[in-house]
């Protein structure tokens, strides 16, 4: 019994071994074992294949996103705002139109004395001040006395004149006597000619001395008075007729606006002693910016105001414009002549000047509508509500808060007149974002 059991057990084991050997010998099962050997390589190829299959899908997704952004992007120079942003920025639009440009240019200047009616008085002689007859602010006429000065030089010149006059009289009498004697044949012609030459020399010396007194400021009346006095005096007191003092007189009619002398002061010929000015008219020198020169010309009417007279207006005209522009300031100097018959204006006052110019019709926009960046000037045009685009223009004159447009804008186009700088900021922001994206 036990032997049969063991025999049956061996038979069953043999059958299982044979069955297993037959199963592994099948072609299909041999092929299944090969992948186990190259399993890593095929897995890698499978993953690579899946990655390649998925990669176009990722690019396609990104391309789709990029295409969506491209649809929303605006061309360069355009800005789009939502209605809320437009309201928040307080953007206002007006159609461009041609209108009258009334030239009113605001300038500043300084009042000065009219140099054509101002005299700076000095003495022709050095000397000492004896008396002052014209005080500050005094109204004087031409020829009125300003001061009395004692001059040694004048006394010497008078002495020389009196001496020359005496020599002239002596020579004159000798000549007249010699002429009578020569006519009577009492003297020779040579002697007569000698007396004649002495007389002519004495005449020239007298004329020289008299002309010198005129150059020193004496009038014909002063010289005649001196000459008459010398005839009435005889003996040792003759020199008492010489008066070394002279009167300094005003060369023009006007007001004493400055005085630089006091009694007893020794003055020299080159010193300025008085300033006399006619204050009924003043000058106002103004500086005109280079850009405003086309608006201003000689003869342009001017209205002058000063801070001390806020309610007062003074009319004048431009009578001079300099022929050059100052390099440092890019300004041109001009002069206004203004009436001052009441004396309300004072030299040295600063003034606000409004210059009027010719009125003309031209396409123009408010100054606030024009934006300047990088050497160019432009405006924003409304293409549709909330959509604006930049338009470069060629500006002209700037008058009264408006700017003329020479090129780049047509009449009727809707221009942003308020909020242009907000659009400029948005435009610059988009430009920076575009650069950053690239």
Image (cartoon, helix red, strand yellow):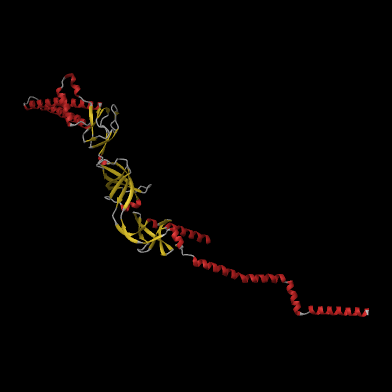
In this view, 382 is above or below 320: below
In this view, 62 is above or below 302: below
Q: State the residue at coordinates (33%, 49%).
A: 106
Q: Observer-nearest residue: 231 or 201?
A: 231
Image quadrant containing the N terminus: bottom right
Q: Observer-nearest residue: 92 or 369?
A: 92
Q: Observer-nearest residue: 167 or 84?
A: 84
Query: Is 85 on the left-hand or right-hand side of 313?
Result: right
Q: Position of residue 352 (x, y in %)?
A: 32, 46
Q: State the residue at coordinates (7%, 27%).
A: 183
**Quarter of the figure with residue 103:** bottom left
In this view, 271 is above or below 290: above
Q: Position of residue 47 (x, y in %)?
A: 66, 70
Q: State the residue at coordinates (19%, 27%).
A: 161
In this view, 178 is above or below 317: above
Q: Position of residue 142 (x, y in %)?
A: 21, 36
**Quarter of the figure with residue 201:** top left
Q: Position of residue 32 (x, y in %)?
A: 74, 76
How many numbered circles are shown? Answer: 0
Q: Is residue 5 visible?
A: yes
Q: Is residue 80 visible?
A: no
* Farthest-out residue, left: 184
């Amino acid at each position: 019994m036990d032997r049969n059991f063991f025999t049956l057990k061996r038979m069953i084991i043999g059958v299982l071994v044979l069955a297993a050997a037959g199963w592994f010998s099948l072609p299909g099962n041999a092929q299944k074992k090969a992948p186990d050997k190259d399993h890593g390589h095929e897995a890698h190829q499978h993953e690579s294949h899946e990655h390649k299959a998925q990669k176009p899908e990722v690019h396609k997704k990104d391309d789709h996103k990029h295409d969506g952004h491209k649809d929303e992007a605006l061309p360069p120079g355009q800005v789009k705002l939502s209605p809320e942003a437009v309201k928040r920025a307080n953007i206002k639009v007006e159609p461009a139109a041609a209108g009258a440009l009334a030239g009113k240019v605001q300038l500043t200047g300084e009042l000065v004395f009219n140099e054509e009616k101002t005299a700076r008085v000095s003495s022709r002689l050095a000397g000492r001040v004896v008396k002052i007859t014209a005080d500050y602010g005094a109204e004087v006429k031409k020829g009125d006395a300003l001061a009395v000065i004692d001059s040694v030089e004048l006394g010497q010149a008078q002495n020389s004149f009196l001496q020359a006059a005496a020599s002239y009289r002596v020579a004159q009498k000798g000549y007249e006597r010699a002429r009578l004697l020569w006519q009577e044949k009492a003297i020779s012609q040579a002697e007569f000619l000698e007396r004649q030459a002495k007389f002519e020399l004495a005449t020239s010396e007298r004329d020289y001395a008299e002309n010198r007194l005129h150059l020193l400021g004496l009038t014909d009346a002063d010289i005649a008075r001196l000459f008459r006095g010398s005839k009435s005096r005889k003996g040792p007191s003759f020199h008492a007729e010489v008066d070394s003092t002279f009167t300094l007189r005003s060369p023009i009619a006007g007001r004493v606006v400055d005085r630089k002398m006091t009694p007893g002061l020794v003055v020299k010929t080159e010193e300025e002693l008085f300033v006399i000015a006619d204050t009924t008219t003043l000058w106002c020198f103004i500086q005109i910016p280079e850009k405003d020169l086309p608006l201003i010309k000689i003869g342009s009417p001017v209205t002058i105001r000063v801070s001390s007279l806020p309610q007062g207006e003074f009319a004048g005209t431009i009578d001079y414009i300099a022929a050059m522009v100052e390099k440092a300031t890019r300004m041109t100097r001009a002069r206004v002549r203004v009436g001052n018959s009441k004396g309300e204006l004072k030299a040295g006052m600063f003034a606000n000047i409004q210059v009027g110019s010719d009125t003309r019709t031209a396409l123009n926009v408010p100054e606030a509508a024009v934006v300047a960046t990088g050497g160019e000037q432009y405006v924003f045009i409304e293409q549709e509500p909330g959509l604006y685009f930049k338009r470069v223009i060629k500006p002209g004159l700037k008058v009264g808060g408006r700017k003329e447009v020479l090129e780049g804008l047509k009449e009727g186009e809707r221009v942003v007149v308020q909020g242009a700088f907000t659009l400029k900021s948005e435009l610059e922001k988009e430009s920076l974002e575009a650069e950053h994206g690239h």
